Image (cartoon, rainbow, N blue to C red):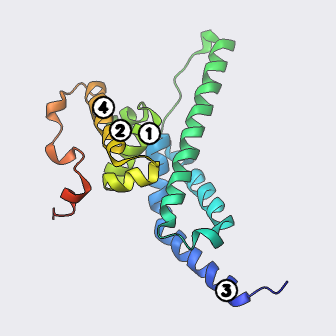
């Protein structure tokens, strides 16, 4: 088997550029979805490790970042589910030693976001932290655009309840706007 070293070198450079461009956004997304800044970098690193193993195929994608975002979201949600199961098991074993899990985030809103169901949490993180359109959110979450808007709507409604604010107090510009309408805004 003959290995094209020029291709391998070019592919490595492409991945390095991609990594440099996307890494901080992936850490931010991981922190938003997992609710834990301490593990966000690890989740992003794991997603990029998986991407590097598949880079030959991913490099041909129009948007390889979408694939990595999906992996980051899945890793973060899987971690939250695992921690939840572990916490429940520990509480059954030692009910008198119940304590809340510490979180590094002290921001009330993101604490409330961390309480949302996974898809809603991911949609909020993508929409507000990454300024993604609902079309992009739908693509990343592998759902229809109307489902992405529904996730955002339900999340905003639940967040208003958790934060003790009426839904009417959410600014109009914070509500999901169809992608075609957002493109016309400054």
Q: How far apart are labels 3 and 1 at the CA level?
A: 38 Å
| Front residue (pair 142, 126) | 142
| Numbered label attached to residue 119 | 1
Q: Are marks 1 and 2 in contact (CB under 8 Å)?
A: yes
Q: How far apart are labels 2 and 3 at the CA level?
A: 42 Å
Q: Secondary structure at mark 1?
A: helix
Nearer mark to the viewer, of 3 and 4: 3
Q: Look at mark 2 in the image and give the residue it sits on.
A: 151
Quarter placement of the C terminus? bottom left
x and y percentages locating residue 38 in the rendered image: 54, 46
Q: Are marks 2 and 4 in contact (CB under 8 Å)?
A: no
* Label 4 neighbour load within 10 Å: few <14, some 14-19, many 20+: many
Q: Look at mark 4 in the image and give the residue it sits on.
A: 159
x and y percentages locating residue 98 in the rendered image: 57, 16
Q: Is residue 67 above or below residue 158?
A: below
* Left or right: 133, with 95 as reference point: left
Residue at (51%, 31%) from the top-left corner? 102
Q: Secondary structure at mark 3?
A: helix
| Numbered label attached to residue 7 | 3
Nearer mark to the viewer, of 2 and 4: 2
């Amino acid at each position: 088997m003959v290995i094209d070293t020029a291709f391998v070198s070019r592919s490595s450079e492409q991945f390095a550029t991609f990594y440099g461009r996307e890494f901080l956004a992936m850490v931010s997304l991981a922190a938003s979805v997992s609710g834990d800044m301490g593990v966000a970098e690890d989740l992003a690193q794991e997603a990029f490790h998986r991407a590097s193993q598949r880079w030959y195929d991913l490099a041909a994608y129009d948007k390889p970042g979408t694939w990595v975002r999906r992996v980051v979201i899945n890793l973060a949600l899987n971690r939250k589910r695992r921690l939840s199961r572990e916490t429940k098991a520990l509480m059954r074993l030692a009910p008198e030693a119940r304590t809340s899990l510490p979180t590094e985030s002290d921001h009330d809103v993101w604490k409330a976001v961390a309480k949302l169901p996974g898809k809603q949490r991911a949609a909020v993180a993508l929409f507000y932290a990454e300024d993604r359109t609902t079309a992009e959110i739908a693509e990343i979450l592998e759902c229809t655009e109307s489902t992405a808007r529904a996730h955002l709507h339900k999340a905003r409604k639940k967040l208003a309840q958790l934060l003790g604010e009426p839904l009417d107090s959410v600014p109009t510009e914070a509500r999901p706007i169809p992608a075609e309408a957002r493109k016309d805004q400054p």
